[in-house]
Image (tube, helix red, strand yellow):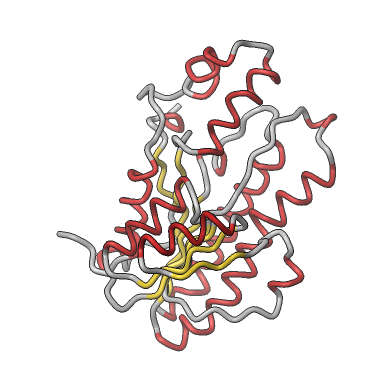
Amino acid sequence: MSTDLTGRRALVTGGASGIGEAIARAFAGAGAEVTVADLNAEGAERVAADIGGRPWVVDLSDTAALRELSLDVDILVNNAGIQHVSPIEQFDPERFSFMLRLMLEAPFLLIRAALPGMYERGFGRVLNVSSVHGIRASAFKSAYVTAKHGLEGLSKTTALEGGPHGVTSVCIDPGYVRSPLVEKQIADQARAHGIAEDEVLETILLQDAAIKRLVEPTEVASLALWLAGPDAAMVTGASYTMDGGWSAH
């Protein structure tokens, strides 16, 4: 049975490419009115035009600008994120702070801005695109792992507070997804581990996965679409792994 989101308003951060773009397209295809939020103005406008949605060009790391925000949406997808690969002792402190603002503080502020309207209507879906790194760790990714672990806790707290008001909150935890973020990582991982780029996929990225391939953005979007729909009304406070078996170890 297909998911029908007709009449729902959705906001997808990081919607100009990768997972976010795939989710925005899936939601629009199911009838939702989608706002595509991204720092990349050209990308946000392109995707929004393609799906009949709205672009929102925004720097989510500027958290001070989000503190008085009010969002009138039924579905919030916290997806925007970046990666930085570096040993802790060499990790730039400002970069660490920037990544936590973007991937943990901004989701908190967007949830905070969206909940009053969701509570008033008695319906809401908060989908947090976390990562297998929300439940596992990898070397050289201290900021990303910290942010995603925090996002998992924020999602569960949102679920507990939102439940009586018809609002659910879940995490989607993909492994490595075929996306610009992962493509950039391959070169970074090669430098960090001192190996050739063509070795990174097999020996680093997919070493612990039972299924030796990258996750497709459309696969993540298909799960997000179900979680946003009426059949997932009892799914909250959960984390859904889509990691090819990585976290089964």
Asked whether, in this view, residue 62 is left or right of residue 110, the answer is right
Q: Which quarter of the rendering shows the C terminus?
A: top left
Residue at x-position 60% and y-position 11%: 196
In the depicted view, which residue is nearer to us: 158 or 225?
Answer: 225
Asked whether, in this view, residue 223 is left or right of residue 161, the answer is left
Residue 241 quadrant: top left
Q: Which quarter of the rendering shows the N terminus?
A: bottom left
Q: Residue furthest bottom?
A: 120
Q: Residue furthest left?
A: 1
Residue 34 percent coordinates (x, y): 41, 68
110 lies above or below 26: below
Residue 154 percent coordinates (x, y): 59, 60
Residue 168 quadrant: bottom left
179 lies above or below 196: below
Numbered label tally: 0
Residue at x-position 39% and y-position 55%: 23
Residue 160 percent coordinates (x, y): 50, 69
Residue 73 percent coordinates (x, y): 46, 77
In the depicted view, which residue is nearer to us: 4 or 162?
Answer: 4
Residue at x-position 36% and y-position 68%: 52
Residue at x-position 69% and y-position 18%: 191
